[in-house]
Image (cartoon, rainbow, N blue to C red):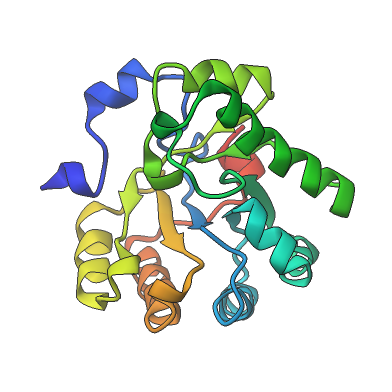
Amino acid sequence: MKYHYNPPLLVKKLFRDFYWNTNSSKVLLTFDDGPNPGTTELILNKLSDEKINALFFCVGENIQKYPVLAQSILGEGHTIGNHTQNHKILSKISNQEKYSQIESVNILVEEKFNYKIKYFRPPHGKFQLSTSLLMKKYYLRNVMWSLLTYDYKNDLSIVKFATQRYLNNNSIIVLHDSIKSKNIILDSISLIVDEMRIKNYQFGDPEECLS
């Protein structure tokens, strides 16, 4: 069961150059798939109230559709990471398309916001041996996770189970900035914050967590 929430140790050892946990004994909160109208605003307001700095893995086409929301993420002091241009699974596309999917997001964000992306997360968390080479080519750091909440299933009980069972002081947590999680996203963040306080853990910002 744990495998579904926290990848196995063997996988983490095989891919040591990927981030699975933080390096700071602090918890990093991450959001995939945005920006998305109707959820990004809710998330940003909640993070501001809780004084949490998060890492948003954004999809290029969503940045193009909703540049104001992307700017708001940066304006609130959060970090944007690369989640490919069209959320395509790397193993299902050619090498040339992989380059395009990654490079186009880096260029888009740098040209539009004068912001250089440092972090990457593959769509659906699916990667290959060649992903390490891609990271080197584009000077990116691949950030995976140690706590998948399944918030996209729109069932707060699953988020609660995952958080209470598998939250550690160096967890990288995945939530989603998407319509699928809209109905429970605020409660999911509150639940995580409450569990953090119970366990006396601290949130860290991306730079210190991924140093």
Residue in the foreground of this view, choosing between 133 and 6: 133
Q: Residue at x 76, y 60 (%)?
A: 74
In the orientation shown, which residue stands out farthest toward the left?
A: 1
Q: Is residue 80 at all visible to an observer of this figure? A: yes
Q: Residue at x 37, y 80 (%)?
A: 184
Residue in the foreground of this view, choosing between 106 and 118: 106
- The image quarter containing residue 2 is top left
The mark total stands at 0
Q: Residue at x 79, y 65 (%)?
A: 71
**Would residue 185 appear left or right of 55 to someone viewing this image?**
left
Residue 7 percent location from the top left of the image = 26, 37
Q: Residue at x 62, y 46 (%)?
A: 85
- The image quarter containing residue 66 is bottom right
Q: Is residue 22 above or below residue 181?
A: above
Q: Is residue 191 above or below residue 205?
A: below
Residue 197 percent location from the top left of the image = 40, 68
Residue 206 percent location from the top left of the image = 61, 46
Residue in the foreground of this view, choosing between 12 and 58: 58
Give the quarter of the figure containing the C terminus: top right
Q: Is residue 171 at all visible to an observer of this figure? A: no
Residue 63 percent location from the top left of the image = 70, 60
